[in-house]
């Protein structure tokens, strides 16, 4: 799978926070919660997800687990990025913590967050 990388998150706040930390231009798409079958197919088609390196970064809560499971079934090649359960939400995770999680998956992050 040599396609461009793309990160799937739940909400716009998550997207903004990750964009702020990343030191490279990566496409980030929001699901805005769990997806219906039609919406899921649209995402896969619109963003060519079967041909891209997909990363899933969702909240560590019930809706996040449900979404992660749903995305895993449709995109078995996707790589998961996890945040510490203590923070529950991507948006509530401290930047250095998120930066480390992204760095562990070989994303370039701004050095200011690596303290």
Image: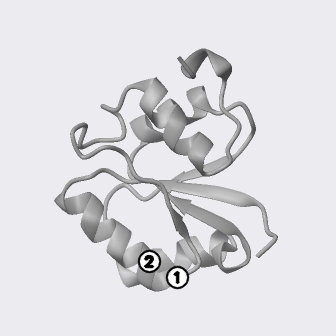
Q: Is residue 35 visible?
A: no
User: What colour scheme governs how the chains and residues are painted in the rendered image of this protein?
Assistant: one colour
- Which labelled disc corresponds to residue 59? none
Identify the residue position indicated by label 2 in the image.
Answer: 72
Is residue 8 visible in the rendered image? The answer is yes
Indicate the position of residue 13 as horizontal and vertical percent values.
41, 35
Q: Residue at x 35, y 34 (%)?
A: 91
* Residue drawn at point x = 59 percent, y = 78 percent: 77
Name the residue carrying label 1.
76
28 over 94 or under it: above or below: below
Disc 1 crowd rating (10 Å Cα; few below 14, some 14-19, many 20+) is few
- How far is disc 1 from disc 2 in space, using C-alphas? 5 Å
Give the SS element for disc 1. Answer: loop
* Residue placed furthest toward the right: 2
Residue 86 spot, x, y in % from top left: 21, 39
Residue 110 place in picture, x, y as percent? 66, 24
Q: Residue at x 69, y 74 (%)?
A: 48
Secondary structure beneath label 2: helix
Q: Where does residue 90 sit, x and y in percent of width and height?
A: 36, 40
């Amino acid at each position: 799978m040599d396609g461009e990388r793309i990160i799937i998150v739940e909400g716009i706040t998550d997207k903004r926070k990750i964009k702020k930390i990343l030191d490279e231009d990566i496409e980030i798409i929001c699901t805005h919660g769990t997806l219906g079958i039609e919406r899921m197919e649209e995402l896969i088609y619109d963003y060519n997800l079967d041909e891209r390196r997909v990363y899933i970064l969702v909240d560590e809560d019930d809706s996040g687990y449900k979404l992660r499971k749903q995305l895993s079934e449709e995109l078995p090649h996707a790589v998961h990025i996890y945040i510490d359960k203590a923070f529950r939400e991507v948006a509530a995770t401290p930047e250095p913590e998120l930066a480390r999680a992204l760095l562990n998956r070989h994303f370039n992050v701004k050095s200011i967050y690596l303290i």
